[in-house]
Amino acid sequence: MRSFKAILILLTLLCALSTVKARMVLQFPTPRGTIVDFLKDPPCASYNSTNVSAITTFPLNGEAIMLFSSGEGNLVYYYAPNSNGTFTKVAEPVTLIKNDTYPRSVTKRVDLTLAGAKAGDQGVLQGVYVSLKNDTAWYQCGDIKIADALQSSVVPY
């Protein structure tokens, strides 16, 4: 039953990736917006307003998940209290290489305390992917409500 569920999720993700013009899709926390044609527009791929219907409870030391359809580059996560704030790096880069199998789901632990965040705060988690081929950056953001380390919304998989 578990393998059937995993296959079903993979097929769903493949379909989602085939219908968008993107190299990456934020899986957790919930991303802002649904059309990802403008991933190159900072800070949040043209979705620069809080999506109040998609605020995700996220732990201080939680794991963000990004799905990639291809790529060779570095993924880094940043946090700011809002889209107009100063984004602070909250995780070391993850390097994706040409020989990786795609689509690839990348899970990365982020430490929001590095940005001075604490439980009860609300802010923006930003994933930035920079291509090693041409130095182009792509952006995805999720609105989060920060919880203690043991609390979070259910991870979608």
Image (tube, rainbow, N blue to C red):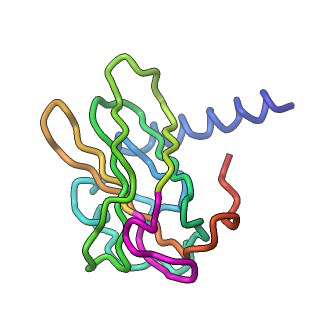
**Which residue: 16% across, 30% down?**
133
Residue 117 falls in image quadrant: bottom left
**Which residue: 35% across, 40% down?**
23
Number of disc labels: 0
Left or right: residue 53 compared with residue 39: right
In the rendered image, the residue lying farthest to the left is 134
Residue 8 screen position, x and y as percent? 71, 35
**Which residue: 33% across, 49% down?**
76
Q: Is residue 97 magenta?
A: no
Residue 13 screen position, x and y as percent? 56, 39
Question: Which segment did they paint magenta?
Answer: 111-125
In the rendered image, the residue lying farthest to the top is 99
In the rendered image, the residue lying farthest to the right is 1
- The quarter of the picture where the N terminus appears is top right
Where 110 falls versus 44 (above or below)? above
Instruction: Name the one closer to the observer, 48 or 16.
Output: 48
Left or right: residue 152 compared with residue 54: right
Instruction: Name the one closer to the observer, 60 or 76.
Output: 60
Residue 75 screen position, x and y as percent? 34, 44
Where 29 falls versus 15 (above or below)? below
- The quarter of the picture where the C terminus appears is top right
Residue 26 screen position, x and y as percent? 46, 52
Left or right: residue 62 compared with residue 68: right
Where 99 falls versus 45 (above or below)? above
Instruction: Name the one closer to the observer, 105 or 103.
Output: 105
**Which residue: 58% across, 66% down?**
58
Residue 10 falls in image quadrant: top right
